Image (cartoon, rainbow, N blue to C red):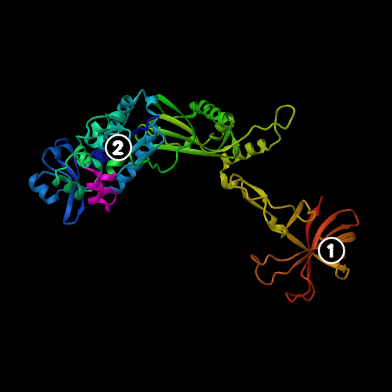
């Protein structure tokens, strides 16, 4: 499939955004009043953007404000909000994903999209460009559009080619030839030099032997080297669309004939379609994002996560219950997408005769529903960690977070129930260098009838502070049959404290 790149040029983004803000306040100037936005220059303020009335009055970008005011005394001047323009363009870049998943910024007033294979969803390239132009005009933005086999060619046609230009690979050279050398995205000094040499069009420059140009521009950077720009324009050097993030592999969408406020009715069908695509490839979703594209150019999104990969459409739809209220529909949206932002391989496993699987799926669904209702930080689960200190071997972590690597088995049997913290006991009689024969715990006096041990556990020197004593653990059984796990903290004469203390740490079931 031939590569297709679409460029969107927004030449009046700054001034049209400014006029839109003033109109919302009821302060918009008359259409016939020349107005312009300015930025600070080397020798004072310079014109950054103009309205159509100002352009007709001879005001142009780059000129000094004092000179333009002398030419047009009634000129209205305001300072441009460059940061606001950048953020607005960033939002438009995300909003433009309604036409294709690969979108990126293209300078300070442009967008570029890799629409390869996307145009047929809109009835062809011409219909897609008309739809883009219509949607942007509803936002109060004028634009120039072009689709071509390369980024450089699309950029050039959008700015110098006319209205809604399309170019096929076989007509690329002919379409580029009459364009000025400025269409090669070169710096002004290089453009001026080429014009002085009589090379004013792309066709004239392409006709010059490469050896001559290479000798002159061998060490020039990308924006100063016409040879590199020519190679990009004609596809001899690759120039991929570098989107801020890769689009999801699994995604479905619903285009709506009229703007709506609630995506809920469309969610079950979208979830079923998404899960069908996941099942066909043997994948399951770990994170699912619902995105609505508003008619005012904004994008609103909400995500849910799962404890394990799933392709259960009903389960995914239920996870969004209570979350759709977080979406800001604005004046309505006409496109809804559901995407598996994170997907993992997931195989169907049968471990029971009735066709079910004892694989923990029900517990994972419960964790998902609780997390969706109460938030991820509120739901935790225990997991084993690499440590031979008993109280450190098990810790709590987020239920939806990555699980730590499972440690090896404990060297000896451990009680199911650990006391936290371990409870100190009073030893009434002890066997020398052995377990206590009688001790008091929780106002009870217990007599030991059987014991096993000791199991010595030394401090973890890489994380314990100096002075921590080693432990000798014993498994004991008292006269009524109950079995406990207790330890002596330290040994006599270890130089790390007084007499060793005894603690009861666990209870065997």
List the residue tagged with mark 1.
Answer: 440
Closer to us: 11 or 25 = 11
Task: Tell whether position 252 is magenta.
Answer: no
The quarter of the displayed image where residue 201 is located: top left
Residue at image point 57% right, 35% down:
284
Crowd tier of the residue under label 2, counting other residues whose Cα lies within 10 Å: few below 14, some 14–19, many 20 or above: some
Give left or right: position of 461 versus 240.
right
In x, y percent, where is residue 386?
Answer: 68, 56
Q: Which residues are magenta?
A: 209-228
Secondary structure beneath dot 1 equals strand
Q: Is residue 473 above or below residue 152?
A: below
**Cα distance, mark 1 to mark 2?**
89 Å
Residue at image point 9% right, 44% down:
72
The quarter of the displayed image where residue 347 is located: top right
List the residue tagged with mark 2.
Answer: 234
Residue at image point 70% right, 31% down:
350
Task: Tell whether position 223 is magenta.
Answer: yes
| Residue 108 in view in this figure | no
Give left or right: position of 271 versus 405.
left
In x, y percent, where is residue 166?
Answer: 28, 29
Count of all numbered marks drawn on residues in the image? 2
Crowd tier of the residue under label 1, counting other residues whose Cα lies within 10 Å: few below 14, some 14–19, many 20 or above: some
Q: Is residue 296 above or below residue 388?
A: above
Mark 1 in CB contact with mark 2 (< 8 angstroms): no
In x, y percent, where is residue 379?
Answer: 61, 45
Nearest to N terminus: mark 1 or mark 2: 2
In x, y percent, where is residue 314?
Answer: 58, 29
Secondary structure beneath dot 2 equals loop
Give left or right: position of 116 versus 230.
right
């Amino acid at each position: 499939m031939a590569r297709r790149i679409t460029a969107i040029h927004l030449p009046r983004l700054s001034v049209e955004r400014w006029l839109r803000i003033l109109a919302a306040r009821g302060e918009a100037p008359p259409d016939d009043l020349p107005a312009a936005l300015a930025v600070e220059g080397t020798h004072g303020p310079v014109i950054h953007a103009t309205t159509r009335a100002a352009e007709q009055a001879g005001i142009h970008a780059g000129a000094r404000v004092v000179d333009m005011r002398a030419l047009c005394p009634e000129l209205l001047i305001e300072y441009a909000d460059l940061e606001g323009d950048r953020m607005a363009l960033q939002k438009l870049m995300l909003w433009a994903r309604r036409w294709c998943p690969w979108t990126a910024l293209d300078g300070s007033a442009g967008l570029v999209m890799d629409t390869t294979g996307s145009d047929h969803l809109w009835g062809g390239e011409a219909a897609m460009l008309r739809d883009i132009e219509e949607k942007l005009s509803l936002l109060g933005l004028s634009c120039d559009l072009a689709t071509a086999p390369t980024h450089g060619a699309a950029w050039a046609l959008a700015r110098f080619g006319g209205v809604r230009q399309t170019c096929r690979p076989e007509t690329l050279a002919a379409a580029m030839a009459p364009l000025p050398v400025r269409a090669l995205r070169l710096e002004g000094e290089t453009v001026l030099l080429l014009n002085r040499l009589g090379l004013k069009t792309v066709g004239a420059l392409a006709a010059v032997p490469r050896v001559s140009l290479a000798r002159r521009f061998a060490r020039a950077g990308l924006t100063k080297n016409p040879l590199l720009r020519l190679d990009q324009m004609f596809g001899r050097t690759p120039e991929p669309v570098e989107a801020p993030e890769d689009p999801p592999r699994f995604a479905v969408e619903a285009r709506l004939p009229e703007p709506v406020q609630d995506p809920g009715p469309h969610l079950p069908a979208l979830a079923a379609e998404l899960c069908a695509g996941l099942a066909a490839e043997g994948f399951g979703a770990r994170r699912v994002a619902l995105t609505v594209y508003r008619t005012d150019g904004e994008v609103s999104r909400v995500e849910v996560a799962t404890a394990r990969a799933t392709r259960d459409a009903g389960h995914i739809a239920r996870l969004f219950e209570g979350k759709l209220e977080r979406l800001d529909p604005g004046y309505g949206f006409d496109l809804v997408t559901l995407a598996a932002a994170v997907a993992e391989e997931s195989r169907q496993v049968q471990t029971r005769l009735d066709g079910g699987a004892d694989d923990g799926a029900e517990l994972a669904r419960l964790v998902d529903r609780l997390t969706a209702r109460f938030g991820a930080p509120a739901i935790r689960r225990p997991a084993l960690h690499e440590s031979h200190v008993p109280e450190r071997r098990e810790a709590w972590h987020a239920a939806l977070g990555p699980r730590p690597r499972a440690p090896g088995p404990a060297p000896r049997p451990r009680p199911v129930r650990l006391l936290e913290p371990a409870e100190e006991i009073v030893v009434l009689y002890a066997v020398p260098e052995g377990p206590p024969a009688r001790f008091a715990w929780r106002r009870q006096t217990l007599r030991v009838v059987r014991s096993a041990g000791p199991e010595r556990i030394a401090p973890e020197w890489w994380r314990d502070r100096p002075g921590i004593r080693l432990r000798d653990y014993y498994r004991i059984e008292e006269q009524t049959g109950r079995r406990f796990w207790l330890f002596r903290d330290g040994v006599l004469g270890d130089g790390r404290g007084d007499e060793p203390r005894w603690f009861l740490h666990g209870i065997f079931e």
